[in-house]
Image: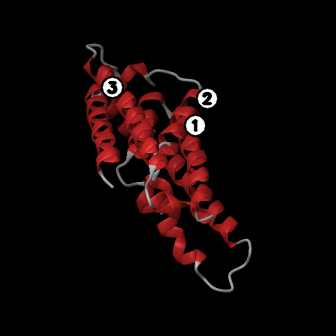
Amino acid sequence: MALGQFSPGPDMVLLTRTALFSGRKSGCWTAVGIACGLACHAAIAVTGVAVIMTRGGTFVLVMKCAAALYLTWLAYQLIRSGLKPSRLSVGDGEGKKETAFTSWKRGLLCNLLNPKVAVFLAGVTAPFLAIQDSPDKWPLVLWLTIVLEGVILWCAWVFLLQAPVIRERYLRVAHWFDLAFGVMLLGLAVMVVCVK
């Protein structure tokens, strides 16, 4: 699970950029939003609905297109920000302030619009759900484990990114990070649509 969370993907790119650019509070609210999306996907995984999603169909196609459009929109914003002539200086402190709700909503949508999360979680939880004589509350225990691990690890990542040496170096080259993250999100948008 932890390796899946920290692999390069839309959630990780969005969380890293938000934490570096907008600070700890926005980063943590983005992490909570991602975890709320993860809670929905985990519920789908532990109840077996993810098996239906692996068969494809119109629903999965619509979700993939919505995810690709959302990632493209995020990429456009980052690339546009990276191409602006104004640069942050170390003395600026944090970048653009955003509300907790905006950060949370962005994290939630980024995670919810990625149907592969439910399929991944179904694969991870399947061996545990197949254990015979497991308690009736076992799916709930798995769900709670997934969600709490998400919140804890992603918020720990946000706090790590707030180390002065990391923030100082980031602020000097923020526009390059925006360009790189924007290009990565465009690549992920293409992968969401093209990869089965």
- Position of residue 36 in the picture relative to residue 6 (left or right): right
Query: Mark 2 Cα within 10 Å, few/some/many (few <14, many 20+)?
Result: few
Q: Are marks 1 and 2 in contact (CB under 8 Å)?
A: yes
Q: Residue at x 34, y 50 (%)?
A: 8
Total numbered circles? 3
CA–CA distance in space, label 2 to label 3: 21 Å
Residue carrying label 3: 76
Instruction: Give amino acid for label 1.
Output: Trp
Residue at numbered disc 1 = 29
Q: Residue furthest front?
A: 58
Task: State the residue in front, 99 or 126.
Answer: 126
CA gap, disc 1 to disc 2? 8 Å
Q: Which mark is residue 159?
A: none
Amino acid at pointer 3: Tyr
Residue 163 seen in the figure: no
Tell me the residue at 60%/55% (across/down).
147
Where residue 108 appears, as percent x and y from the top left, is 55, 39
Q: Nearer the viewer, mark 1 or mark 3?
A: 3
**Left or right: 86 as drawn, with respect to 10:** left
Please state which amino acid type lies under the numbered disc 2.
Phe
Q: Which residue lies at the image location 69% right of the left edge and 65% below the top edge?
A: 140
Answer with mark 1 or mark 2, whichever residue precedes in sequence.
1
- Circle 3 packing at 10 Å, graded few (<14), some (14-19), many (20+), is some
